[in-house]
Amino acid sequence: MKFNKVGQVSLVSAIALILASTFTACNPTTIDYVFVAGNKENPGQIQTFLADRVSGALSIQGSTVSSGGVDPVSLAVSTDYANLYVANQGDSSLVQFSISSSAALASVNTLTLSSEGNSPVAIAMNAAGTLLYVANKYQPGCSTAVTGAATCNGGALAVFPVSSTGALGTPVANGSLSYWPVGINPTAVNALASGDAVYVSTYDPTAGLGYLYGFTSTTAGALASIKGESTISGTPFFAGVKPVGIASTPTSRFVYVTDFAQNELIAYSVLDGGVLQPLINGPFKTGNQPSAITVDPRGIFIYVSNELDNSVSAYDIALSTGTPSAAVNTTGSTTNVTGTQPVAILVDPAYGRYVYTANFLDNSISGFELNASTGTLTPAQSGPYPTVGQPAAIAAIPHGNHSIEVDQP
């Protein structure tokens, strides 16, 4: 069969289109690198994934690496995306990894906690990338918490300066201490984007009360307690019964806390000096056993992982008041199904288009596409994505240069 010139051009164009489509399908455009830490093995493991721009699907990048310690529970990345920090609770270690341009991880340094407290539960980087906050379950020399005891009567918040190379320096001094005391059973730490304040959530099961310990911060990392509502030592703010996760908006105007015991989302306005004022129309309903929480990079949506329900709850934030309203998806539901026991959650930092949860019991990541207009979620392509055993923490960095506009009230 012969083709005229027009037919030949059409055939060549069709072949080129097919080849281009095939090439694109085989070589997806990566917008983020996603890191997941699993604590089933000893030492723990870190796995790296590529996030596809079009579908949000994850694919494995390279080989897993050791977390450098036992029982990794929290991850943080430097603001220049050149370093990943891992908190290993089992051996009280902080490990710094360099991140290459292809997301390859290389262990740079390991610091064993001692005078700063031990058994880290959560870490967080300040927005300037100059301080790493470490919430430790126990104070120095302790391996148990005793309410009202002279020693071992709470957790410890340590502040590490971060150099331009990502190295952790000597912890900031609090008088003769290398930490700031907080209540027993600390669970999370969050620093305002403004750099003005940092908060640690704790709970006392005997009293049946949860608290937020607030501190103002200097640029050098020196902290000062913020006077809260409680009269107990440290004057914290009340936070339900068992606060587990904390998140704040990019404008530093609102703070949100999950109450694991009461299935609620507690919302606060941030007043002068970092003082927290609960929203009068809260708390707000979540799924069962809400734990991890994140605010999208634009500051207009909240996502909460519900461990017992195996779901994510989505909320739209009223920018003027901070009030969260449940986002209803196309099926009429306010929750979105994940794998079993989602314990960590994030929104992709490149475009703010995808939400991912680390699912502890079925060793997977669930992915969702975020509707930028409504905040509702739809499952990402080909998920859930198998991971290392018992994924407990998740973090991500953008691949390439991206800009996400932060909404203002």
Image: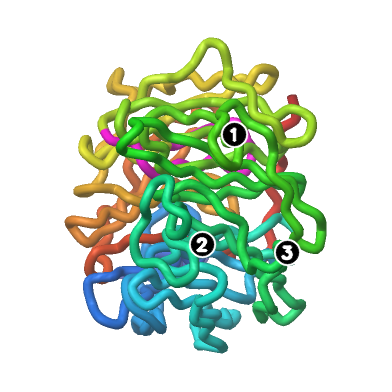
Q: Secondary structure at mark 3?
A: loop
User: Is residue 16 something that shows in the picture?
Assistant: no
Foreground tag (1 vs 3)? 3
Disc with the residue nearer the chain's start (1 vs 3): 3
The amino acid pointed to by label 1 is: Val
How many neighbours does mark 2 have within 10 angstroms: few (below 14), some (14-19), or many (20 or more)?
Answer: many
Residue type highlighted by circle 3: Gly
First in sequence, mark 3 or 2: give its number: 3
Secondary structure under the numbered disc 1 in the rendered image? strand
Front one among 229 and 240: 229
Q: Which mark is residue 175?
A: 3
Q: Residues within 10 Å of mark 3 (few under 14, many from 20)?
A: few
How far across and down, in percent of the image, does residue 374 sit?
Answer: 50, 25
Q: Which mark is residue 122?
A: none
Relative height, residue 213 to residue 83 (above, below): above
State which quarter of the image contains the C terminus: top right
Label 3, label 2: how far apart the Cα atoms are? 36 Å
- Upstream in the sequence, badge 2 or badge 1? 1
Q: Work out how far the residue at label 2 is from the one at label 1, CA to CA, in angstroms.
A: 22 Å
Q: Which residues are magenta?
A: 289-303
Magenta stretch: dominant SS?
strand
Indicate whether 332 appears above or below 350. above
Disc 2: which residue: 396
Residue under the point 43% across and 23% down:
327
Q: Is residue 125 above or below residue 301?
A: below
Q: Is residue 103 magenta?
A: no
- Residue at 40% across / 31% down in the picture? 209
**Circle 1 crowding by C-alpha within 10 Å: few under 14, some 14–19, many from 20:** many
**Cβ–Cβ under 8 Å for marks 1 and 3:** no
Percent x, y for residue 335? 31, 29
**Residue denoted by label 1:** 255
- Marks 3 & 2, CB-CB < 8 Å contact: no
